[in-house]
């Protein structure tokens, strides 16, 4: 890949569409050119083979370009990364008068049933692929959701035990009279309650773990925080996310695949909900390198935390709640508090005496406690971040899903804690607060690991603002 110095405007990224010889230097140039000249709109009768692209046009992947081969044309075009795939993702018009259109990701398609994927013109969209059964096997397009069993159909207001038993007797008598089998019925009210308690829908149970300092203790003066244990309460985030996906309240207010949305008249890129951003698209590109993930739905898990003081009727107690949401739901659903945001944990807040509050050991322990707690809470999500699993949705369909950790919403103090950097350093680049206007490299995992291998702890702290 050619690395171009800032300010050098050489055209070094081509349009990879067959027969097109245009070159570009920045993102918006190729984006506008592709959407204007090479955009593909699909109809309800378009073949599904349009979705079988090996790579989507994502800004993550670049072509190796020889600067001597470009023809010198289009010097005013802007730079953008080219995609090696010649297939443009399917586009779908939407809004009154088709004011905008969306290009959907071709590989992580979400498996939404065709007869639920309607645009405002009542035309089924093929950009959303097939559902699957409870075993993860894809179903033909238009397959209806599985029927609920007799036990799942029994809902209603709370009733007395005698009323439940009486209704069961009437139900059994009606089946016997009609010559039907009664083996699928509840035996009595206890069987009803047992079935209700074993259902997967509803609130996720809370659990806890205890963490304690296991490092070296001072012989002459052991700090009190070294002897204490710290409880962390949490819900299984995997179960919480599955409950969100199964919520029927916002079944039709979810984005099942990443997309890019553009204004039809000007081809201007516009953003609104989380899945319309470049991050979700780029993650889908990386995930779809594994062919086993094609046809799955990408579910970004958004986390957030913030220390909170509750003074009403609690005596000014401090809490450290951890929140979770999914990036698929629309913004209006998340803002309306329709169970799309959930508290999944309460983190520990170690305290000590003023004498030990500024010590290196205590500060390091606080960082380790925070990261160890997050790692333990999120461990159940890790297996499904590389291999898809089958999840049930609010419309009773099953779908193959693959999870990923998305953005973490936090204030600067917690960003410092999350990124393991020194306070007053930038969380995005390698600059101190007094020199933020200077040019600098952006923070990256590869660069940080290389610095840790080559520098000692003092140099990392003083020169790069990294806590090693």
Image (cartoon, rainbow, N blue to C red):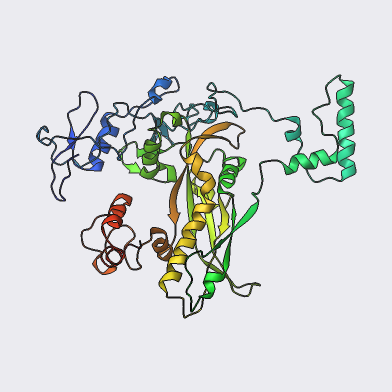
Residue 435, percent across and down?
A: 24, 66
Note whether 334 is above or below 186 in the view shown.
below
Give left or right: position of 233 versus 352. Answer: right
Q: Residue at x 67, y 27 (%)?
A: 147
Snapshot quadrant of residue 79: top left
Foreground: 63 or 328? 63
Q: Residue furthest front?
A: 219
Q: Residue at x 73, y 35 (%)?
A: 152
Residue 307, percent across and down?
A: 51, 66
Note whether 221 is above or below 150 in the view shown.
below
In the rendered image, is residue 273 in sight? no
Residue 384, percent across and down?
A: 50, 39
Foreground: 136 or 438? 136
In the rendered image, is residue 240 in sight? yes
Q: Residue furthest bottom?
A: 355
Give left or right: position of 344 versus 31. Answer: right
Give left or right: position of 8 versus 323. Answer: left
Q: How many marks?
A: 0
Which quarter of the rendered picture does the N terminus lie within?
top left
Which quarter of the rendered picture does the C terminus lie within?
bottom left
Residue 85, percent across and down?
A: 30, 28
């Amino acid at each position: 890949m050619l690395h171009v110095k800032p300010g050098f405007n050489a055209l070094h990224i081509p349009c990879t569409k067959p027969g097109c010889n245009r070159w570009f230097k920045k993102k918006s140039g190729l984006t506008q050119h592709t959407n204007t000249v090479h955009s593909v709109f699909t109809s309800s009768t378009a073949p599904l083979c349009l979705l079988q692209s090996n790579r989507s046009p994502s800004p993550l992947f670049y072509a190796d370009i020889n600067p001597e081969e470009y023809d010198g044309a289009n010097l005013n075009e802007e730079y953008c990364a080219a995609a090696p795939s010649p297939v443009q993702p399917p586009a779908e018009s939407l809004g009154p008068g088709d004011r905008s259109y969306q290009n959907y990701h071709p590989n992580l398609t979400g498996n939404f049933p065709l007869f639920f994927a309607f645009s405002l013109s009542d035309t089924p969209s093929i950009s959303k692929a097939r559902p699957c059964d409870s075993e993860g096997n894809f179903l033909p397009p238009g397959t209806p959701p599985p029927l609920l069993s007799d036990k799942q159909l029994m809902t209603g207001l709370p009733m007395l035990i005698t009323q439940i038993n009486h209704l069961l007797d009437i139900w059994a008598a009606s089946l016997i009279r009609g010559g039907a089998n009664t083996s699928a019925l509840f035996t009595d009210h206890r069987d009803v309650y047992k079935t209700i308690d074993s259902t997967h829908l509803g609130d996720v149970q809370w659990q806890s773990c205890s963490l304690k300092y296991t490092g070296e203790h001072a012989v002459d003066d052991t700090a009190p925080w070294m002897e204490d244990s710290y409880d962390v309460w949490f819900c299984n985030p995997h179960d919480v996310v599955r409950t969100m996906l199964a919520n029927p309240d916002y079944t039709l207010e979810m984005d099942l695949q990443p997309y890019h949305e553009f204004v039809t008249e000007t081809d201007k890129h516009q953003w609104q909900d989380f899945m319309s951003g470049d991050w979700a698209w780029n993650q889908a590109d990386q995930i779809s390198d594994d062919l086993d993930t094609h046809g799955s739905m990408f579910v970004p898990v958004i986390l957030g935390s913030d220390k909170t003081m509750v003074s009403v009727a609690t005596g000014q107690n401090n809490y450290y709640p951890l929140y979770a949401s999914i990036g698929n739901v629309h913004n209006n659903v998340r803002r309306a508090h329709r169970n799309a945001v959930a508290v999944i944990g309460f983190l520990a807040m170690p305290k000590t005496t003023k004498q030990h509050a500024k010590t290196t050991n205590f500060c390091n322990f606080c960082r380790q406690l925070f990261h160890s707690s997050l790692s333990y809470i999120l461990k159940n999500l890790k297996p499904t971040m590389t291999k898809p699993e089958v999840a049930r949705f609010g419309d009773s369909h099953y779908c193959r899903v693959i999870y990923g950790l998305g953005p973490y919403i936090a204030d600067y103090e917690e960003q410092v804690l999350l990124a393991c950097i020194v306070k007053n350093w930038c969380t995005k680049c390698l600059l101190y607060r007094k020199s933020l206007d200077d040019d600098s490299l952006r923070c990256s995992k590869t660069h940080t690991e290389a610095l840790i291998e080559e520098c000692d702890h003092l140099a990392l702290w003083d020169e790069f603002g990294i806590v090693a």
